[in-house]
Amino acid sequence: DFTAEVERSLRVLDGGITVLDAEEGVQSQSETVWRQADKYKVPRICFVNKMDKLGADFLATVKSIEDKLGANPAIMVLPIGAESTFRGVYDLLARKSVIWSGEELGAKFTVTDEVPEGMLGSIEKYRNKLVEEIAETDDVLSEKYLANQEITVTELKKALRKAVIAYKLVPIFAGSSLRNKGVQPLLD
């Protein structure tokens, strides 16, 4: 019933954050609003919310973003745990773990260089994929990537920003907004 209001709002936005439930994935109303945002070429970032909810599945939600919305997802963080064991995210670009502890609703967290136990393989796989996806959107970075030259995080972020604005990539973040976990990397 609020389609007209959404249409009017989308016309003036510089960008948007699409919040999706980690258990439910992309739902029909999300698809409708996504298509409206496509119509007005609004750049978007996705936040996979409720990672602490029973049945939360980050990668299945990313797959539904790809399949149902036709987006080109760029996974920016990997959740550390899921459901009752969700405790943080691993920032793939920065190569940092962001861990929340206690029940201060996300007020206290630590950032470390530690790789969470059992995640090294998936971290390397998804970081390499992320660097490749970003490099593909920029000619200079593509040449560096193909020549196996080091690409700096600053170069990647600059190219990512351009790719998001041009709607070539949709960055994907994860967390639990109710407990204010994962929101900080998203805002950064």
Image (cartoon, helix red, strand yellow):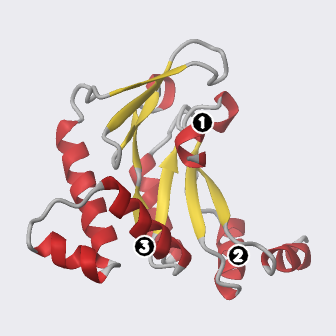
Residue position marked by numbered label 3 in the rendering: 72
Q: Number of numbered discs present?
A: 3
| Mark 2, secondary structure of its residue | helix
Of tags 3 and 2, which is closer to the observer?
Answer: 3
The answer to which of 39 and 66 lies nearer the viewer is: 39
Residue at image x 48%, y 78%? 70
Residue for badge 2: 32
Nearest to the eye among marks 2 and 1: give it: 1
Closer to the chain start, of discs 3 and 2, is: 2
Is 76 drawn above or below residue 185 in the view shown? Answer: below
Residue 123 location (% of width, % of height): 25, 44
Question: If the image is split into quadrants, where does the N terminus sit?
Answer: bottom right
Mark 3 element type: loop
Q: Is residue 123 visible?
A: yes
Residue 89 x %, y %: 43, 36
The mark found on residue 176 in the picture is 1
Q: Give me the C-alpha separation between circle 3 and circle 1.
A: 23 Å
Residue at 27%, 56% (x, y): give it: 152
CA separation, marks 3 and 2?
Answer: 18 Å
At label 3, counting other C-alpha atoms closer than 10 Å, the crowd grade (few under 14, some 14-19, many 20 or more) is some
Q: Is there any visible trace of residue 50 in the rendered image? A: no
